[in-house]
Image (spheres, helix red, strand yellow):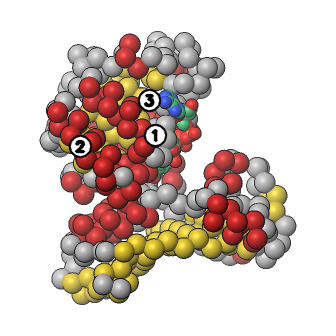
Amino acid sequence: MKRIRVVQWGLGAMGGGMVKLMLEKDGLQVVGAIETRKDYIGKDLGDVIELGEKLNIKITDNPKSILKKSDVDIVILATNSFTREVVDTLQLIAEAGIDCITIAEEMVVPEASEPDLAKTIDEFAKRHDVTILGTGINPGFVLDSLVINLSGVCHRVDRIEASRLNDLSSFGPTLLRSQGVGTSVAEFKAGVSGGGIAGHIGFNESIRMISDALGLGVDKIEEVREPIVSNTDRETKYIKIKAGMVAGCRHTGIGFVNGKEVIRLIHPQQICPEAEKAETGDYINIFGAPDIKMSIKPEIPGGVGTIGLAVNMIPLVKRASPGIKRMIDLPIPACLMGPEAYIRRM
Ligand code: NAD
């Protein structure tokens, strides 16, 4: 079996994990890595991801030095969340004639937040005959493509309500700040108005994907960010909060058709949810014919799931037609366990 040659662009929590997973897959070969961190450049990839052995791959900050179509089949991009921030990188990869999977949240459905840029990206992808996919656990899977797959057995769907209740305890200060953890209620409200407390990035994308897949015709999306106020003291490796302070953000996205709610996605993210007996999990409720209720307890771990999806989508992207793809444009993802997963699906 000819292995698919992959360059990993971005070696943070996600990128490092993707390299480790790809090394376990017989059908994949990691051939390069790109980073801007000064302490990584020039070092061996195996050392930087603490593999315990060298990979004989030098990390570079010069993409053009390694992005050659004759040597690379696909790039996984794990650097940023926003289409505007990754568009130049995507163009450079496309101009090299190489396919790309990105985990930038907005790229899961780029036209939802950046319609003009989405058009530009689709055009340059087609011009250079490459495929670009945005994926990840959420957006990309739990609150959109999984919901869409479940709806496949329904005769009629009246309304969808799905929630992902997760634990932020293992995350560091940057993510905790973006969710308002450790603020007072007044600071939380000011942070939401000022944009510093963003909550979840992805409701626009997930609602748009569900609406388009089912043909629901959502014409308005509203988002609400509310503080999860703790009744107890809570403590993680990174932060201690007192009762009365904010433990997280309950972020809700609602899709309407002619003023009627048809999709409600709820994402309460907090530290130490067990402190108040909140059970983490992914819950999908489809109301229609038939009603469908699915719960996954505890929730699918976000980082692990994102790494898995990005890697498992590689053969599917390699066989796709050129242009921007969404998860609903490609066959359903499956864990790459043996040769058939590469050959049959290619
Ligand atoms: P991280 O901060 O741990 O790592 C990002 C890495 O990218 C850093 O090492 C940084 O130095 C590097 N980097 C940034 N810009 C670069 C550039 N131009 N060239 C080369 N390297 C660059 O973040 P992470 O946890 O690995 O996540 C990466 C991104 O993916 C984040 O924006 C995150 O929000 C997003 N994400 C999306 C999903 C999803 O469900 N869709 C899930 C997880 C993460």
Badge 2, how many Cα within 10 Å: few under 14, some, many 20+?
some
| 301 or 40, nearer to the observer | 40
Residue at left 46%, top 23%?
34
276 left or right of 322 in image: right
Q: Provide residue 286's location: percent of width, then percent of height.
A: 34, 80
Pointer 3 residue Cβ closer than 8 Å to ligand 1: yes
**Snapshot quadrant of residue 69:** top left
Residue picked out by circle 2: 122
Pointer 2 residue Cβ closer than 8 Å to ligand 1: no
Q: Secondary structure at mark 1?
A: helix
Q: Earlier in the sequence, mark 2 or mark 3?
A: 3
Q: CA distance from mark 1 to mark 2?
A: 16 Å
Residue at left 70%, top 66%?
190
Q: CA distance from mark 2 to mark 3?
A: 20 Å
Q: CA distance from mark 1 to mark 3?
A: 14 Å
Badge 1, how many Cα within 10 Å: few under 14, some, many 20+?
few
Q: Is residue 108 above or below residue 60?
A: below
Q: Provide residue 308's location: percent of width, then percent of height.
A: 41, 45
| 141 or 252, nearer to the observer | 252
Q: Is residue 51 above or below residue 215?
A: above
Residue picked out by circle 1: 85
| 136 or 178, nearer to the observer | 178
Residue 55 shows in the view: no
What numbered label is drawn on residue 9?
A: 3
Give the mark toward the camera: 2 or 3.
2
Pointer 1 residue Cβ closer than 8 Å to ligand 1: no
- Residue type at the position of mark 3: Trp
- Residue type at the position of mark 1: Glu
Q: Earlier in the sequence, mark 1 or mark 2?
A: 1
Q: Secondary structure at mark 3?
A: strand
- Residue type at the position of mark 2: Asp
